[in-house]
Image (tube, rainbow, N blue to C red):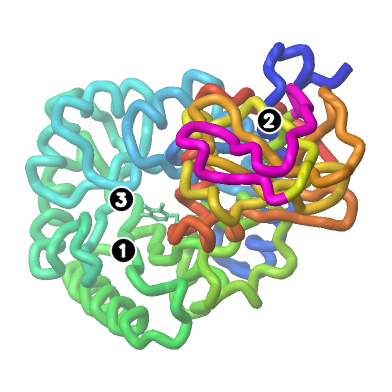
Amino acid sequence: MSAASASGRWAWAEIDLAAVAHNVDVLRRTAAPAEVWAVVKADGYGHGAIAVARAARSAGCTGACVAFTAEGVALRQAGIDGPILVLSEQPASDAPAIVAAALTPTVSTITGVDALAAAGAVDLGVHVKVDTGMHRAGADPTDVLAVVEHIRRERRAVRLAGCFTHLAMADEPDDAFTQHQLDRFDDVLATLAAAGHDPPLVHAANSAGALAHPAARRGMVRAGIAVYGIAPGPSVDHLCRDLRPALSLRARVAAVRRVAAGERVSYGLHHTFPVATTLATVPIGYADGVRRGLWPGGELLVGGKRRPIVGVVTMDQLMVDCADDEVAPGDEVVLIGSQGGERITAADWARHLGTIAYEVTTGISARVPRHVVRTP
Ligand SMILES: *Cc1c(COP(=O)(O)O)cnc(C)c1O
């Protein structure tokens, strides 16, 4: 009996931690001598933050990154040691939780520094984030020195442990904006150096930066999507051939029926069968993250063959046209992953849905059980 059956649900995601370890290894070799910190925000891009953070740490990641305080606290409570960087400045009301869990906060403002001091921080390492052109988070380059000087004034509470920026166009290797951002970043670092500030860790690269822009690697890289074995985008696909996808999405056929030519299927009866066919019902739907946009045109794997989803995807179930194949309840179905010689990737879904693979895996909802496997 597989773990999947034991869960009681005939739909589950398998998380391959050996693939995570392999991908960390690839990234470490690519980025060396830079350190690799694993980005495990959004529950590890849908893979399970705690399991991935542990696996990444054993594979040589020296730190973890999260988006929000609560994500970092959950990792600490699960026993993840080492630095946990919260990637942007959090509300002042989070400062006590950041201090209590010994997270590594990002600061971009003087009030952010004050909040940590007021929360009782003692020699807490902080990273200063610089907005070099993405305009989402971080201090304006002209304000960075003032923030860093304030950190020095509050030196009993906080210590400058790092300085970083974030790239907006790293997944388009030919775009000049990445170099423009790195130039602005270097100007800021030069200003800090002239005032006697030397941040121990300097970083700029996400996965695409680490893979496609050697000049962005610096002291560490913040690798998210590549840790999960997924390319950051089609333009850097060729740099991701050694990565292995860590997530597969699987289910079992719940019901099989033979329908006659002219019958229709699912809500709205929008699909009419031109010939008699065998129809399988799969117990996974849009509330699990299998988006309605996957019909028409989306496929999944049954008996090692690509088979079309037919009719609208419903909240909890969808239907697949299996033609004249022998299909039985309990047969395994693959929505993302391999079966036989066939493979469907999160990037395939993303292309079909007009989105990115990040949204596909983070969109697999909490209702889908995650089962950790290790395939060597
Ligand atoms: C999400 C995020 C990353 C990781 O990006 P990937 O493209 O998944 O590697 C790195 N840095 C920051 C600031 C982020 O928000």
Region of the chain picked out in magenta, as a range: 252-274
Residue 205, x across and y down, in percent: 44, 66
Say how many tags the image has. Answer: 3
**Where's the C terminus, which quadrant?**
top right
For disc 1, the neighbor class at 10 Å (few under 14, some 14 to 19, many from 20) is many
Local secondary structure at mark 3: strand
Which is more toward the observer, 78 or 225? 225
User: Picture quarter containing residue 261?
Assistant: top right
Mark 3 neighbour class, 10 Å CA radius: few under 14, some 14 to 19, many 20 or more: many
Q: In this rendering, which labeled residue sits more in front, label 2 or label 1?
A: 2
| Coordinates of residue 357 in the picture (x, y in percent) | 52, 55
Mark 2, Cα crowd under 10 Å, few <14 / some 14-19 / many 20+, is many
Is label 3 in contact with label 1 (beta carbons under 8 Å)?
no
* Left or right: 46, with 151 as reference point: right
- Residue at mark 3 to residue at mark 2: CA–CA distance: 47 Å
Question: Which one is in front in this view, the residue at disc 3 or the one at disc 2?
Answer: 2
Image quarter (top left, top right, bottom left or bottom right) of the N terminus: top right
- Which residue does the numbered mark 3 point to in the structure image? 127
Callout 2, which amino acid? Val
Horizontal side, residue 89 vs residue 35: left or right: left
- 255 is within the stretch colored magenta: yes
Residue 38, image x, y percentages: 54, 48
Q: CA distance from mark 2 to mark 1?
A: 44 Å
Quarter, ligand 1: bottom left
Looking at the image, tell me whether mark 3 or mark 1 is earlier in sequence order: 3
Q: Which residue is mark 1?
A: 165
**Closer to the camera: disc 3 or disc 1?**
1
| Amino acid on which the number 1 mark rests in the picture | Thr
> Which labelled disc corresponds to residue 282?
2
